[in-house]
Image (tube, rainbow, N blue to C red):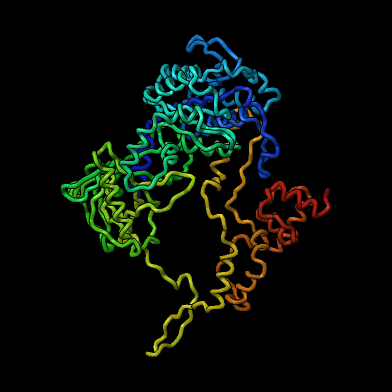
Amino acid sequence: MEDRDALEEETYDAYDGRDAIIFLIDASVPMFKRPPVDDIDAAQTENDCPFVLAIKCAYNTLCSKIFTDPNDSVAIVLFGTKKTAPNDKYGVYTNTFLLQDLKNPDCEPITQLDDMLNKDGGMDEYMYAESNPQSISLADSLWLCSSIFSKHKSKTDKKQIFLFTNNDEPHSKFSAKQKQAERRIGDLQDGGVSIFLFPIGEEFNTTKVYQVGILFLFYLIVTVTMLNHVFIAMSHQELLESNDKGGILPGSMTTDELLLKICRKCQKKRTFASLVFNLDSNTKFGVRLYNLIRPAAQPKRVPLDKRTNEPVKSVTTKFNAETAETLLPSELIKYTTVCDEKIRLDKNDLASLKSKFPSGFTLLGFKPIGKLKLHLHLSPASFIYPDEDLVKGSRMIFGALMHRCKARGFAPLCVLKMTAAMKPRIVALLPHEEHDPNQAPLFGFHVIILPFRNDVRKFNYNELVESTTVLNDERKFVQQIWKADPNQIDAAKAVVKKLTSKVGYTPSDYLDPALRTKWNTLEGMALGRENIESVEDLVMPDIDAIDNRLGQRSTTFNDLVFPLGYQSQYVPSASKAKDPKNEAAVEEAAKNGWVDKMTVDVLKGYLSNQGIKGVAKMKKAECVEKIKLHLNLK
């Protein structure tokens, strides 16, 4: 799996695809009206006007891209406003204002939006909305967006326009301005620009002007897609929402809903590899390989010279341990271990081993899905999708293969080689069956890497489960593993059932506290903020909540499983913090004024011994205050 990780890192660094996004925000009178309080959900705490929601989305997108995609470009254009400013680069358009030009995320545009949202009167400068709807021209604002894209330095960026509005009919039907807007939308789409409408408000009617203007040119695309996906049941609306050329998304009422939809549109669907799928020696088709899960790694450290502050390049030189002579690359010998013996391999041997299978997928056969041991997990699964650009007709063959595998319950077994230099792996292809109602259905196979025999470790029960020495029927002493009786099994099931979350596990709900704290610190330093937001580690268990939920179930389980007087050989480190010997030390430290010098584990252990609840979520400062309050030292 080292080869896979190395290739993944190399592919990610070499990827040069960039996005150029323009936030086209309606700044007319309806966008500054706050929604009625009765229409807001009880769980919703924000009561911002639609214009503020759109600015918040732009602000959060800039803050995210400055770390994740610093080479992307973002601009903000307001239309339906009286605010104007001379612009020699693009010219002046009616009721249209360029708030921020198209450029890479930086501190200056983020600070400008932060002042608009948080400073008193920050929005007053931009609230000069045009009161006469007849003078607003959507075509002029789209013309400005076209000019911004045409003068952008990079011509290979993926161009997108995110349109935010709560007005479902900016122009009357069959009017001259509507025809101009439709013509301008068509010109942008012909130029490779994707337009996505983000309606604000649940009562937004998409059947009016915007649907005619934005979705009219997609009918041919939808028809072709339905023909190519002959085996996939896909609704018309799902195709429109999932189309990369643009579309209309469902209405939103909160910032979180808008940010979730923006995140899905901004997420780069990076192709990990374009490979050939070899059904036999004469039949081939193309597929694209995607990695659905990728770890969020911290930025690499760059060593600097302390005198010049320039990056330092490291050079590795290998020596002979016996003679201390420098070894050339041609003098190095590689080997592999087979049955505890080292077998020497030269470059020709390695090349011949790796050339036995061609790059891509090579079909070996089929196996019932129920016979696959998917619990033998090696790495996260990948996903393949037909690549019509690599081989014409790939989508039809791929769809037929997937349809028959689903119908008969079989999974293709293949040999996978990412590149000619990588080792071959045996993989199973599972057809995708799940369907999320909030997303378009996936059309492809999940690539499950199967282990070789050396990858499967032997499981020794004696190391994990207690056993006793008994005399068997052959008059020999053998180790008999302790087995749980039905009462113990029922008690364990009750504990697991009570502690199992009903909402399931969503990785996006649990942020990495170390990584998030690092980003918050860098963001605070760059923007000159005094207070940096702290990140709570949501993975740490809430001991008090667990105790309240279990009740007497944990006591019942312990009484049935562990006999009276049982001493475990594994002593958790947390028990040291709750040692009664530390209580006197904590109290003495609190009275002498240096209790804040003690570790958090010791402080929490003292509070737990004193019967104080809610200790698990306390920070060190809170523990110190709680101890002083408990000892009446304030």
Q: Quadrant of residue 151?
A: top left
Which residue lies at the image location 43% right of the left edge and 46% below the top edge?
Answer: 293
Pick the front one: 121 or 450? 121
Left or right: residue 499 compared with residue 372: right
In this orientation, does residue 310 appear? no
The answer to which of 387 and 379 lies nearer the viewer is: 387
In x, y percent, where is residue 180?
46, 18
Going by the image, does 15 lie left or right of 571?
A: left
Q: Position of residue 178 (x, y in %)?
A: 48, 21
Q: Is residue 205 left or right of residue 480?
A: right
How many labels, in total? 0
Depth order, front residue of 555/401: 401
Residue found at the far left of this picture? 282
Left or right for 149, reference 171: left
Q: Residue at x 71, y 25 (%)?
A: 120
Q: Position of residue 603 (x, y in %)?
A: 70, 54
Q: Is residue 584 visible?
A: yes
Name the residue at 42% across, 83% down: 478
Q: Position of residue 368 (x, y in %)?
A: 31, 62
Task: Single out the residue that lies furthest toward the front.
Answer: 174
* Residue 580 found in image quarter: bottom right
In the image, residue 221 above or below residue 602:
above
